[in-house]
Image (tube, grey):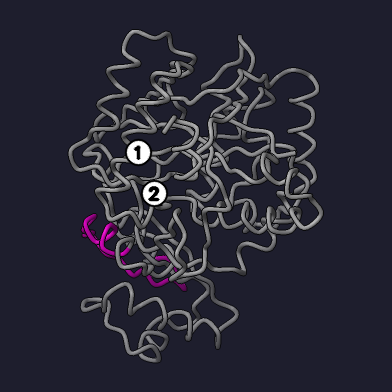
Amino acid sequence: MDYLEKFEKLGVKIPSILLPKTGTDYSKYAVLACDQYAAQPDYWERVKNYVGEAPSTLHMTLPEAWLLSGDRDYEKRAKAMEKYLSEGTLEEIGEGFIFTERDTPDGTRFGLVAAFDLEKYDYSPGTDSLIKVTERTDITRVAPRVEIRKKAPLELPHVLMLIVDKRDKFMSMLKKECSSLPKIYDFDLMEGGGHIRGTKIVAEEVYQKIADILTELFTENGGTFSFAIGDGNHSVATAKCYWEEIKKNLSPEEQKNHPARFCLAEIINLYDPAMPYECMNRLLSGVSDPEKALSEMGLDLLNLPSLQELQPILDRWLEGHPEAFIEYVHDADTCEKLGKEPGCIAFCYREFDRDSVFDVIKNNTVFVRKSFAMGHPFEKRYYLEGRKIR
């Protein structure tokens, strides 16, 4: 079986990538995923001041910190995308995968940017899809994102797709194949995000090796899933909802290769030692009487239940207290500090077993939303590669 057949069976497609034109300051162009530092708007103010008017993904995305403060100007972001495309700020570099090497304080981690078939994915828990979710999808967060995607001519992903590869066959092969190839980018990421290098892969013999190893891993892991979404679940759910909406007006032939049928993401290994896993912490804000609130929920901060038990308790309490809201904070120390602010309560967890991710995937179940974080906030994926979706 050739690589194209194997890719189709696994839900993989070789993407056509957009990157900034030569001469662009990549350190200002690449910006951290918009869902990070939502409770720390000062981070995004520093980014805004650093970027200025330079070409940047900051102008095409909307940080949640700004969304929470009332910024709803989605049209502005879509217009920035159109401008970058029409003026040639973003250029097609042609079809090919991109092998990434990201240096962080936890080491160098490796990834492969590819496109994924949304027909092979379903965000509903328990469905028998090849591309699995690991966390429960909050559908209320998807609808407004679909409206944004309708206006956007391209996507800028921060999604991480997991493979289960304890022997590190996949990335080891890519490191070897890409060691002598030229880099298409090589720069420092802003705000302590580390250093990133990218290598474009276009050789058919490497495509075949990629397809062969991914197929081997698929078989070794029980033949029930090809990938699992480790980060960016709601982004993929948004792409899926948008695709389901527009495909109704397409013929079967038009559906086969329509750009909106696919989403761009980066494959990483669940067992990459340079990718730490942490429990996501909860921060309640706008709480008039924290002690009373804890009593109503029956919770003791020194003896918390499991995260899977805690989330439903918080959800029920929040339903009766619309003045309060919940935020998800990656770093336990940061969450604990924020929890000392007036009207706040922090629920902190400090250990996470990555084997539990494989167990959830294997058993076709899901964690509660925002159960775990892959890497510290500054280690999350930065917006960099783009792809046209219409």
Image coordinates of residue 16 in percent, x first then y, are 61, 27
Mark 1–mark 2 Cα distance, whole angstroms, equals 8 Å
Picture quarter containing residue 58? Answer: top right
Q: Would you name the residue on which mark 2 appears? A: 226
Q: Nearer the viewer, residue 79 or 236?
A: 236
The residue lying furthest to the front in this view is: 1
Q: Residue at x 30, y 67 (%)?
A: 363
Dot 2 alpha-carbon crowd within 10 angstroms: few under 14, some 14 to 19, many 20 or more:
many
Identify the disc placed on residue 3: none
The three-letter amino acid code for the residue at tag 1 is Leu
Q: Residue at x 41, y 58 (%)?
A: 329
Q: Is residue 344 magenta?
A: yes
> From the viewer's perspective, is residue 359 above or below residue 157?
below
Total marks in image: 2
Image coordinates of residue 289 in percent, x first then y, are 45, 83
Q: Which residues are magenta?
A: 341-360
Q: Would you name the residue on which mark 1 appears? A: 214
Image coordinates of residue 327 in percent, x first then y, are 48, 64
Q: Residue at x 42, y 62 (%)?
A: 370
Q: Nearer the viewer, residue 254 or 347?
A: 254
Pointers 1 and 2 in contact (CB under 8 A)?
yes
Q: SS at mark 2?
A: loop
Dot 1 alpha-carbon crowd within 10 angstroms: few under 14, some 14 to 19, many 20 or more:
many
